[in-house]
Amino acid sequence: MTRAGGPGEGAAYDVQLGDGHLGNGHLNDGHLGDGPAIGRVLGTLDATPLQFWVAVSPGAYLQLDDVVVTTRVLPGGAPVTISGVVTQVRARHEGASFDSDVFAIADGTLPAQIQEAAEITTTRVEPEVYVPPEPGAVVRRAGGSERDGALYFDRMDKRIPIGFGRDGEPLYINAEFLDGTRGAHVSISGISGVATKTSFATWLLYAAFRSGVLGGAGETTNTRALIFNVKGEDLLFLDHPNTRIDETVEAAYAKLGLPVGPFPDVQVYAPPRSGDPTGAPDVASRMTGVDAFYWTVAEFCTERLLPFVFADADDDRQQYTMVVHAVAAHLARVAEPADGGVVIDGRRVGSYEDLVDLIQDRLLDEETRPDWTGSAVGLGTVNAFLRRLISSKRDLSRLIRGDLPTDRPHGVNTAESKQVTVVDLHNLPDRAQRFVVGVILKSEFERKEKSGTRKPLLFVVLDELNKYAPRDGTSPIKEVLLDIAERGRSLGVVLIGAQQTASEVERRILVNSAIKVTGRLDAAEVSRPEYGFLPPAQQKRALIAKPGTMFVNQPDIPVPLVAEFPFPAWATRHEEAGTPPAGTLRSAVTATDAFAVVAAARRQTVPDDEIPF
């Protein structure tokens, strides 16, 4: 979009857009002082301290999201500055009585004039004397320090750039509402494929990491991010530069004070290929720098992971849930680790299928059933449990293994990984995705609990949040997410959740999200109370918002900011991926110098089974 300034208005600017993302925004004349007069407070409509209308001067205009400021002088001479954001604009013929008069006015046979007016929603009153602006008071377009004051940017000690406003100038969020200082968690909603939810989530991470607001170099380096990739392989190339970056995009990043480039420190994990005895990661487009993740049968038993096999394991309406926890506790007691597998009652179990078969045998045997489930459980309840357990064989067999080396790196631990850890789930069925998300989040949250400190932070990016934490019912995964939403701030765990429909997400998670973001929304969804923070005009705009446009609400500012974030500097798909840094070409398995290990083995300091070939 290219916009030129008209008579009487402020600095003009050019905004280059491409592929739905903001490329650049810059003031042409470098004007940073107080903006020029743009109109006067309307006297035919009520003006209140929180909302008023402005009659726009001839030859000028106001658009949605413009920032304006006016002043009222109190008795005694004390000035009160009232700042606000344009939340609605209208134009009408003054002097027309009938709809058909528009034709006579256009022909010049009926005298009338066009008058534009803008609704202003107050964002800040300084000092806090809440009086309405006087009709006829001059209204100016805010720029420079006045704009920063109107949007509270001047009070943000630590601020993270989120993109550009309609005036081409940077917009920010207060980092204190992201890092847990005063609040935490982000909720991002919008239509799939149009709202660019995941793109904004990764952009927010990039801005937080590269803006320097998280602390010194050491603290920023130690901060971690855990991203679950559930759609395609687009997030597997965060460490690859984007080949479509041009000078326009570079200028946009420079204006925001950010470097241009990919995420510098990324580790990618993927599930093993189904039926592959070597445990090779199941990815198609990225061949290097990817490690397989899985759990051994012994870990499955000793860590009591069975409840995560059942999506509704804690639902009180389901009687078989008591069997789930009883069997999990029994496995933890009797399973003896044996080279990745376990030995139970003298029987070697070397795979998930074997484990399910053993549980089935024990629960159907009337003599052994009480030891596994207790004496109060009926056969019907046991059969309901077994039906669901048996159906999980196909989905979980490649994730729970007893045939791969136990000393081979196979777990996801962000504390021992790189700054950004991407866990690829897109090739897994729904049940397996739930299992992976639940188990990893549980282990990461427990690790943060044991550390006892909030720093370094851990950001968790999870798409399809409505699937893992639905409004109705309970599950082990939902309980973990609720724990993160309610206690994560104090432990340094920040949830960045994305979903198509916020109305289907657990309310407590949304309530605990300090920052709420929406992109393009469905007409039925936008009318839900979860989007009550959007003014009526923004609710209508959300129906037609283009990719890259986000409505960002934060506690500091009473009106959501409408931001367009820059085109990603990292590859968002395989086709646009440039050459990655050399350090990313190795996985955790191949990161060790094999020849150095062989040399050490010959000196009898390293066991033969640790040689990586």
Image: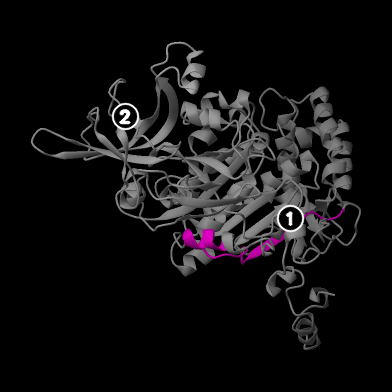
Magenta region: 250-273
In x, y percent, where is residue 565?
Answer: 55, 50
Q: Vertical placement of 224 versus 486: above or below? A: below
Q: Would residue 270 be counted in the magenta stretch?
A: yes
Q: Vertical placement of 57 versus 298: above or below? A: above
CB-based contact (under 8 Å), mark 1 and mark 2: no
In x, y percent, where is residue 611?
Answer: 81, 77
For this view, does 63 lie left or right of residue 447? left
In this view, the residue in front, 357 or 493, is 493
Q: Amino acid at mark 1?
A: Arg
Quadrant in the picture for residue 286 = bottom right
Q: Would residue 475 be counted in the magenta stretch?
A: no
Residue that mark 1 sits on: 573
Q: Secondary structure at mark 2?
A: loop
Task: Please tell me how many numbered marks the rendered image carries.
Answer: 2
Which dot marks residue 50?
2
In this view, the residue in front, 477 or 301, is 477
In x, y percent, where is residue 254?
Answer: 50, 63
In this view, the residue in front, 532 or 442, is 532
Residue 53 visible in the picture: yes
Q: Amino acid at mark 2?
A: Leu
Q: Secondary structure at mark 1?
A: loop
